[in-house]
Amino acid sequence: MSEKAVRRIAGRAAAEALPGRAVTATGVTAAVRGQRAEVSLDLALPYPASVADSVGLVQEHVAARTRQLSGLDVPRRRPAWHARAAVPPRCAGSGARRPGTRPR
């Protein structure tokens, strides 16, 4: 089976993993080696939700569904956490102003 087909299967499986909640695979990669497929997903998860619980459920569903539809073994890996840092507030005296205030 081609890597492109495995990517499409995994992306769709991610979208159906949490019924009633929107999960979007923003990036999917797959490597097929023999009878094994390694899949990696970047996800947009619904808020509010436990990230760890949501990722675990998505991971299990994607592995099972990809295995079912492709016939390939899909090992479960630990998730790699990539968090975007929040923009730090500007310091007083830096010339920045608070929203809703007028410049002097």
Image (cartoon, helix red, strand yellow):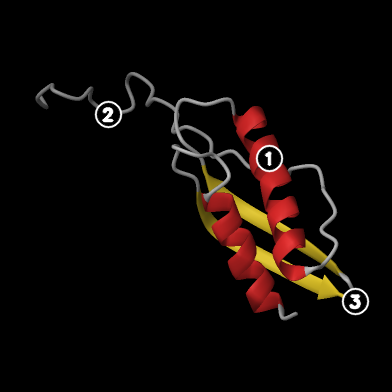
Classify the position of the C terminus by image quarter: top left
Mark positioned earlier in the residue sequence (3 or 2): 3
- Asked if the residues shown at circle 1 and circle 2 are in contact, with their CB atoms under 8 angstroms apart, the answer is no
Q: In the image, is residue 31 above or below residue 56?
A: below
- Asked if the residues shown at circle 1 and circle 3 are in contact, with their CB atoms under 8 angstroms apart, the answer is no
**Looking at the picture, which amino acid does disc 3 mark?**
Gly
Residue 65, x across and y down, in percent: 69, 56
Neighbour tally class for label 2: few under 14, some 14-19, many 20 plus, Cα within 10 Å: few
Residue lying furthest front: 68
Q: Is residue 89 left or right of residue 51?
A: left
Q: Could you say which quadrant of the image residue 41 lies in?
A: bottom right
Classify the position of the N terminus by image quarter: bottom right
Give the residue at x 44% y 43%.
22
Q: In the image, is residue 64 above or below residue 35?
A: above
Tell me the tag on residue 29: none
Neighbour tally class for label 3: few under 14, some 14-19, many 20 plus, Cα within 10 Å: few
* Closest to the observer, 80 or 92: 80
Q: Please name the residue that numbered disc 3 is placed on.
A: 34
Q: Is residue 104 left or right of residue 76?
A: left
Q: How many marks?
A: 3
Q: Please name the residue that numbered disc 1 is placed on.
A: 81
Q: Nearer the viewer, mark 1 or mark 3?
A: 3
**Looking at the picture, which amino acid does disc 2 mark?**
Ala
* Closest to the observer, 60 or 89: 60
SS at mark 1 in the image: loop
Give the residue at x 81% y 58%.
74
Could you give the CA–CA distance between mark 1 and mark 2, rounded to whole angstroms?
32 Å
Could you give the CA–CA distance between mark 1 and mark 3, rounded to whole angstroms?
28 Å
Q: Could you say which quadrant of the image residue 6 lies in?
A: bottom right
Q: Please name the residue that numbered disc 2 is placed on.
A: 96
Residue 11, x across and y down, in percent: 58, 60
